[in-house]
Amino acid sequence: MAEHLARRGGVWWARLVVPARLREATGRREFIQSCKTHELHIAKLVGAVLVAGWRRQLLALEPVAMNSDVLKLIDKAPALTAGGYLTVADAAALIGVERNWLLRIAATYSLKLYCRLVNVSGYILVGSDLGGA
């Protein structure tokens, strides 16, 4: 992931170059966005989420079987090839942080987290429905 991070004025930025064959479809040569932090360990987490989202966008533009080009695109993030979702504990372990710390960072930087309950019926709630969230 570190190859997708760069520092500008002390702040870390995430960057992903768009393959030449997809530049016309995306209208851009690269994706770039601030991680809004001076700390590398936080930037790695935020950057991983940004790059994963960009890679999903690129894959959506090229709906093909898993050929060598697609494998090269996602080679640096093997968790993306697994499909489905990671548990919070697994995600924390993958990036080498504690689960509670990961949840605090997710809340601070408004990272998208999804919950899947097995064998439990229920409804989707927004944060304001939870009171104090």
Image (cartoon, rainbow, N blue to C red):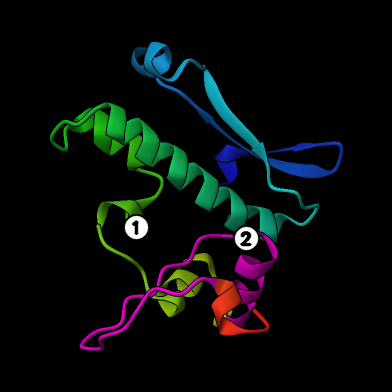
- Where is residue 10 drawn, in percent x and y? 85, 43
Where 11 falls versus 107 (above or below)?
above
Residue at 45% x, 69% y is 91
Q: Quadrant of residue 45?
A: bottom right
Q: Quadrant of residue 55?
A: top left
Q: Are marks 2 and 1 in contact (CB under 8 Å)?
A: no
Residue at the extreme left: 65
Q: Which mark is residue 79?
A: 1
Nearest the eye: 44 or 60: 60
Predominant SS along the magenta part: loop
Residue at the extreme right: 9
Nearest the eye: 49 or 72: 49
- Where is residue 26 drawn, in percent x and y? 43, 20
Residue at 57% x, 73% y is 127
Amino acid type at mark 1 = Ala
- Where is residue 15 drawn, in percent x and y? 59, 34
Residue 80 left/right relative to 54: left
Residue 130 left/right relative to 72: right
Q: Which mark is residue 110?
A: 2
- Where is residue 96 drawn, in percent x and y? 54, 71
Amino acid type at mark 2 = Ser
Q: Is residue 36 visible?
A: yes
The magenta stretch is 100-126
Q: Indicate yes or no whether the magenta region holds residue 121.
A: yes
Numbered disc total: 2
Where 26 falls versus 77 (above or below)?
above
